[in-house]
């Protein structure tokens, strides 16, 4: 139902990882944590390297640790911060994490670990649902970059939008150097407001589609 607008949005977000392969952005909170000392285990006091494992369990006493407040959904679900997500991989990651942190596996553990498992499981569920759906995934990407769309917000369609997308794609096809890639990356980085406009429209269409589905359900 979204047609060319949805495809254009996919192109916008798809340009980001393609421009500079392997480059990942950090949210403001996560970036501010870079270089800080690693947290200590609440149970044994041991320190843990931030690069080690999934950061759920203490490497010394194996006690479940509290959720990392600086970790975003993409990091948690082991996905690149991009609109393009491998949903099969996402599902496998979700199942893997729930086998690690689901509260059912902590019924005989300490109260701290029971509480932490509840929080971890909730975060995993939220991350999975957010990244699985294209609309919520796009909105979450914008939120990570400080752009939020509030309920009732309306935007007038920019008629030049699709033409600009075509021009960006042409530049990307012709780009042969790192400097050209950085130029395209800069264009996309400065264009989040346009992505916000498209996502707002997609949310309206999504609401209409949900109403259509409800209308089709026999009473």
Image (cartoon, rainbow, N blue to C red):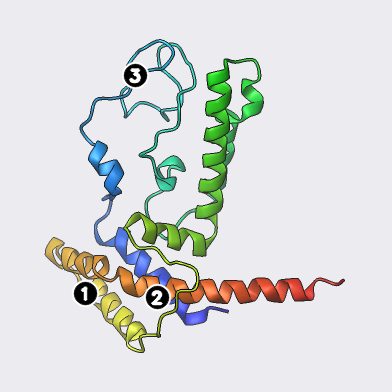
Mark 1 neighbour density, 10 Å: few (under 14) some (14–19) many (20 or more): few
From mark 1 to mark 3, how far is it between C-alphas? 50 Å
Is the residue under label 1 in contact with that under label 2 (CB below 8 Å)? no
Q: Which mark is residue 40?
A: 3
Give the labeled residue for mark 1. Answer: 174
Q: Residue furthest left?
A: 179
**Which x, y percent locates residue 174?**
21, 74
From mark 3 to mark 2, how far is it between C-alphas? 43 Å
**Which x, y percent locates residue 165?**
32, 79
- Position of residue 154 relative to residue 60, above or below, is below
Q: Earlier in the sequence, mark 2 or mark 1?
A: 1
- Position of residue 48 relative to residue 170, above or below, is above
Q: Earlier in the sequence, mark 3 or mark 2?
A: 3
Mark 2 neighbour density, 10 Å: few (under 14) some (14–19) many (20 or more): some
From mark 2 to mark 1, how far is it between C-alphas? 27 Å
Residue 6 in sight in this render: no
Give the quarter of the figure containing the N terminus. Answer: bottom right
Residue drawn at point x = 37 percent, y = 52 percent: 81
**Which x, y percent locates residue 43?**
44, 13
- Position of residue 23 relative to residue 189, above or below, is above
| Disc 2 element | helix
- Position of residue 15 relative to residue 56, above or below, is below
Q: Quadrant of residue 99?
A: top right
Give the labeled residue for mark 2. Answer: 197
177 left or right of 109 in image:
left
Q: Residue furthest bottom?
A: 159
| Disc 1 element | helix
Q: Which mark is residue 101?
A: none
Q: Residue furthest front?
A: 152
């Amino acid at each position: 139902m979204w047609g060319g607008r949805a495809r254009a949005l996919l192109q916008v977000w798809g340009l980001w990882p393609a421009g500079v392969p392997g480059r990942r952005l950090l949210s403001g909170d996560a970036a501010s944590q870079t270089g800080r000392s690693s947290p200590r285990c609440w149970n044994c006091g041991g320190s843990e390297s931030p690069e080690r494992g999934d950061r759920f369990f203490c490497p010394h006493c194996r006690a479940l640790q509290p959720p990392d407040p600086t970790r975003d959904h993409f990091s948690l679900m082991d996905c690149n911060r991009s609109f393009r997500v491998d949903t099969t991989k996402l599902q496998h990651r979700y199942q893997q994490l729930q086998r690690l942190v689901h509260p059912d596996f902590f019924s005989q553990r300490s109260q701290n670990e029971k509480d932490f498992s509840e929080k971890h499981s909730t975060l995993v569920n939220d991350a999975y649902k957010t990244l699985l759906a294209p609309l919520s995934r796009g909105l979450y990407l914008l939120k990570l970059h400080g752009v939020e769309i509030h309920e009732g917000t309306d935007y007038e369609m920019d008629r030049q939008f699709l033409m600009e997308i075509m021009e960006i794609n042409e530049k990307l096809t012709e780009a042969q150097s790192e400097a050209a890639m950085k130029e395209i990356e800069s264009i996309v980085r400065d264009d989040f407001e346009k992505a916000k406009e498209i996502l707002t429209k997609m949310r309206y269409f999504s609401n209409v589609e949900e109403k259509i589905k409800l209308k089709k359900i026999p009473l």
